[in-house]
Image (cartoon, rainbow, N blue to C red):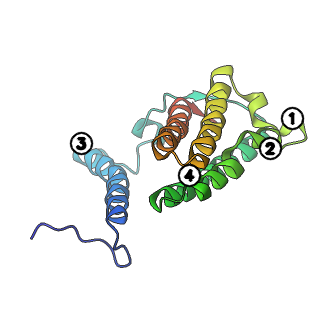
Amino acid sequence: MNTLQSPPGTSAPGKKLVWLLTLAVLSVPLSVYCTSLDDDTDVTEAEPESQFMDLRSYVEMPEKARQILQEDMLDHLAVLNEINRYLAENDLPAAADVAENGMGRSLLSKYQDEEMRPGRHMPKEMREIGWELHDAAAQLVTAARQGNMKKTLLAYQRITGACVACHYSYRIR
């Protein structure tokens, strides 16, 4: 029989897909490591830079702003996960509330000390990607509150597209 076996506690088909995607993502570092072993080099002697060349632009910012940005990105990741859950449950009002409170435009002014605001230290293009994320979140809120699943999902894709664009283009360490 050709059925997929999910880990215990994952009975829904959507959970099987998440499990498979997680497994695929986690297997990439292992395959890269195994490939590096094939070329007869001692991995323990290789410098980390020789294993991976990071072509993203480095964005320098004060330590406090960097910490805030990292905290915000982790919060956004948790918000995306929660939105995923509500979309899977077809609970658009809850998805709208989470998006508004976790990624909405109101977050842009949450830091009173302007020096602490990470956006102040970003290049213009990086800042524009951030604006796109917050604008897409606002669009998701509107579409979800109107009960329009298709527009909600399109807005959600814009959010994740902004995440991908920024994380593929910039680094802060």
Reply above or below: 118 against 13.
above
Three-letter code for the amino acid on which mark 2 is drawn: Lys
Quarter of the image with the N terminus is: bottom left
For disc 2, the marked residue is 64
Three-letter code for the amino acid on which mark 4 is drawn: Leu
Can you name the residue that lies furthest to the top here? 124
Left or right for 6, reference 60:
left
Please report contact status of discs 1 and 2: CB closer than 8 Å, yes or no. yes
Can you name the residue that lies furthest to the right here? 113
Q: Earlier in the sequence, mark 3 or mark 4?
A: 3
Which of label 1 and label 2 is nearer to you? 1
Which of label 1 and label 3 is nearer to you? 1
Q: Earlier in the sequence, mark 1 or mark 4?
A: 4
Can you name the residue that lies furthest to the front here? 146
For disc 3, the marked residue is 39
Gap between marks 1 and 2 measured at Cα: 9 Å
For disc 1, the marked residue is 115
* Residue neighbourhood size for the residue with mark 1, other residues' Cα within 10 Å, grouped as few (<14), some (14–19), many (≥20): some
Where residue 152 appears, as percent x and y from the top left, is: 52, 43
